Image (cartoon, rainbow, N blue to C red):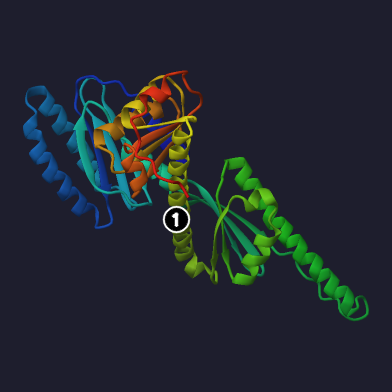
Amino acid sequence: MNYAKLRKHLIALASLPTCGSPLVSAFFDLSKGNASALRDFQAWTELTRQTFSGARRQEFDDATEEIESWLMKAKGLSAAVFCRWGEHPLFLPMEFEVPLESRYHVDELAVIYPLVELKDRFNRFVVALTTAESARIIEVNLGSQSVELLTERPSLRERIGREWTREHYASHRRERNRRFLKDKIAVIESLMAKRGHNSLIIAGDARYVNRLTDALPSHLKHKLIGEIKTGISDQRLKDVISQAVNSFLEAEAQESHGTVQLLVSSVRAGGLAVVGVEATRRALGQGRVECLVVSSSLLKQDQEDLVRLASQRGVPIETVQNCELLERNGGAGALLRYLLPNYDSAEVEEPELEPVV
């Protein structure tokens, strides 16, 4: 599963019409094995099927049986499945290389917040693994490698003696190093521009990381979110990628909290923002939202309502974990494209604002 496919699936699920048949939304943590996940799911289905009767129970049973059959073949660290039988059947399975908490739901609408949060936290980024002789430029997409490009140092000709003096040799070596840096930057720049990346992490021995960082043009330095100064080898690649993912998650968490501070500051200044569930829901319905901000601790139904509206309209969503400032201000808010005169100031739900540092 890659970022682009997940985005398309989210839009489709958010826009999915109801038809009266139960739709099962199942999220599986596969870290303890598929059999363990299956047993947990079967315990939930046995209890939940009692809440249906007649044709709806049969549709529920058919949907959960299809999920169980697929689950034993699922690969990855986690999975999500959406399944519905009846007149308008649906079966949409997804496999991920990032963790998901096991959760099961059945309703007429799909539950999508766990995927919205996964998409926001495990966004795409680029990691450049640099050594003395080569650089591996890797796109990390939802926690796993999706694109890898390689650039190698130009060969150094051994011509000391009659043809070259030592000064000529040293000059050629410096030119070779300069070309190698330039080639690495060109590959990084091309990949990030073509695929719309905004985050870069550089990893490798400290001296090579420092050289590449110092040589980056300003527009790439602004996208540099972390450095991992460690030796690189094929055996350690998985560990380094894991470190890069953790560095990205730390940067993502800081960015999310920064967005909350911007949101609250804008409300205090009477600017382009609202806080509170109802004010945010109204702004989404009016098509005025530039970015939705949602707390992971918000009531599940409110989470689903807001992210479904935002996904239907293609509005970017920022999910925030462990942020008391957002929770004290209603657990949700929105940065707006424009204000409605004499309207937004009247509908703000008296946020508990505090000085923003």
- Between 178 and 318, the one lying in front of the other is 318
The picture places residue 167, in percent across and down from the top left corner, at 88, 76
Whether residue 221 sits left or right of residue 86 in the image: it is right
Res 1 visible: no
Find numbered disc 1 in the image and state the secondary structure of the residue it sits on.
helix
Disc 1 residue type? Answer: Glu
Residue 211 percent across, percent down from the top left: 68, 65
**Circle 1 residue:** 250
Q: Is residue 96 left or right of residue 222?
A: left
Residue most extreme to the bottom = 161
* Left or right: 174 in relation to 181: right
Q: In the picture shown, does residue 73 fall above or below 174?
A: above
Q: Does the image show residue 37?
A: yes
**Is 299 rendered above or below residue 205?**
above
Q: Which of 165 and 350 is in front in this view?
A: 350
Residue visible at 33% across and 47% down in the picture: 324
Q: How many numbered markers are drawn?
A: 1
How many C-alpha atoms fall within 10 Å of the one at disc 1: few (<14), some, or many (≥20)?
A: some
Q: Is residue 181 left or right of residue 66?
A: right
| Residue in the image at 24% along x and 58% along y | 32
